[in-house]
Image: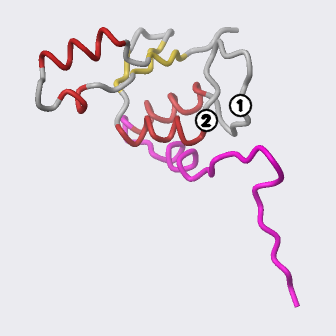
């Protein structure tokens, strides 16, 4: 079973082309995409969606080392698609997750007296 979604960061050539086309606001035009292998749809990521993928250190297909992440790229991309259709439950759940911690647990202990 393969992965449904593929992360496509912008290449250097695409960045240079955007810089020439939009000389004043070229940084706003450069955003990575997520490609749906099943339907052929390419989703251009919004700033908060890209930030969530980076913050959660989402495991990308093809990586040799899988980071300690509570979600996969398929989970996040599926939540993005549902969010754009108006179903925000999965996006709210995933976006409320904390960054995974590599050493120790993520819960804090509270001393009760």
State which quadrant residue 100 falls in.
top right
Q: Look at the image and give the residue range highlighted in magenta.
A: 84-113
Q: Nearer the viewer, residue 5 or 83?
A: 5
Could you tell me residue 113's position as x and y percent?
A: 88, 91
The residue labelled by disc 2 is: 57
Q: Does residue 106 sit above or below 75 in this rendering?
A: below
Q: Earlier in the sequence, mark 1 or mark 2?
A: 2
Position of the N terminus, as image quadrant, is: top right
Could you tell me residue 81's position as x and y percent?
A: 43, 30
Count neighbours of disc 1 (C-alpha within 10 A) and say few if under 14, some if 14 to 19, many if 20 or more.
some
State which quadrant residue 72 falls in.
top right
- Outermost residue toward the right? 113
SS of the residue at dot 1?
Answer: loop
Q: Which residue sits at x=44%, y=42%?
A: 87
The residue labelled by disc 1 is: 67
Question: Residue 6 vs residue 105: left or right?
Answer: left
């Amino acid at each position: 079973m393969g992965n449904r979604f593929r992360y496509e960061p912008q290449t250097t050539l695409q960045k240079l082309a955007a810089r020439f086309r939009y000389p004043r606001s070229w940084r706003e035009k450069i955003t990575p995409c997520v490609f749906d292998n099943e339907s052929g749809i390419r989703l251009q990521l919004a700033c908060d969606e890209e930030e969530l993928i980076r913050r959660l250190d989402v495991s990308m297909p093809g990586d040799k080392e899988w980071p300690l992440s509570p979600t996969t790229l398929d989970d996040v991309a599926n939540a993005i698609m549902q969010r754009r259709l108006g179903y925000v439950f999965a996006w709210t759940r995933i976006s409320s997750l904390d960054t995974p911690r590599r050493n120790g647990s993520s819960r804090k202990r509270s001393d009760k007296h």
